[in-house]
Amino acid sequence: MYGNGLFDAGRVFVLPNATDGKAYAFHEEARNRICQDLGLEESCFVVGHVGRFVYPKNHDFLLDIFAAIKRRRPDSVLLLIGEGPLQVRLEEKARRLRVFDAVKFLGMRDDIGAWYSAMDVLILPSFYEGMPMVAVEAQANGLRCLLSNNITTEALLTENAVMLPLKQGPDAWATEALASSRRTANLPAAFAIETQAESLYAAYRHFFRRALGPQWDTIVFRPEASARHGTI
């Protein structure tokens, strides 16, 4: 958008959109609780997706994948977290595919970490997307992630993530999904909130020092107080 000149000159500060891996860690209790609340057997195969019901997310293809999974694993369920203008159309397609009873339209949630723990695989078959934080959070959970190769490869943070082309079709995606297994994983330092908090703190110190010059030494910088008041 702005050209490469400033970036190549080292005048651009890049801060990855990091996350708190501990907040998204896998918890067996959360999975058991959610399965119980939804009336699911603990042994069922749980497919998940988090995102708005809009064209770029490609929920149509996701339902085709799930139908293929369901034919092989009749005990499978699909958890759809999100809202959006295409929900009614997707509900109608789920009925046509005869999987509606196994698809849970869950709306918006503020406890996403627990829902990742309930899933066995996260599928993001997007037509186009930048860096999906959903994929970052899910990998922090140790969740297997199947991503469209239309998504940036920067989303491949751990061995839990795999990219597939949409042209392979729903059966190939279903095969990969059913081969999934949860693995313990640690996010790279670039996406660890502790690391990036320190980077941001150092950046502000650098900017203040450049802007204020010798006056910098007279300022008492108290990040802990600033955090309490929502300022820097």
Image (spheres, helix red, strand yellow):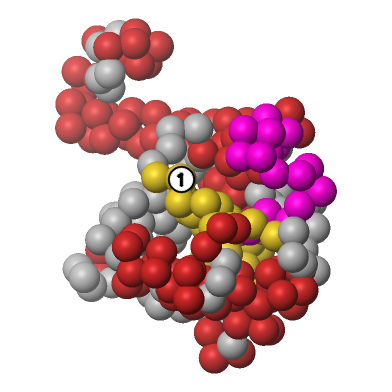
* Nearer to the camera, 151 or 87: 87
Q: Identify which amino acid the numbered label 1 is placed on.
A: Leu
Given the current orientation, which residue lies at the most extreme bottom position?
Answer: 167
Q: Is residue 161 above or below residue 223?
A: below
142 sits to left or right of 57: right
Identify the secondary structure beneath mark 1. Answer: strand
- Residue bearing the label numbered 1: 106
Specify start and end residues of the magenta stretch as a single range: 31-47
Q: Is residue 44 visible?
A: yes
Q: Quadrant of residue 145?
A: bottom right
Quadrant (top left, top right, bottom left, bottom right) of the N terminus: bottom left
Q: In this view, does 17 lie above or below 157?
A: above
Q: Residue at x 50, y 32 (%)?
A: 111
118 sits to left or right of 218: right
Q: Give the percent coordinates (x, y) of residue 51.
A: 41, 55
* Nearer to the camera, 33 or 13: 33
Q: Residue at x 34, y 60 (%)?
A: 87
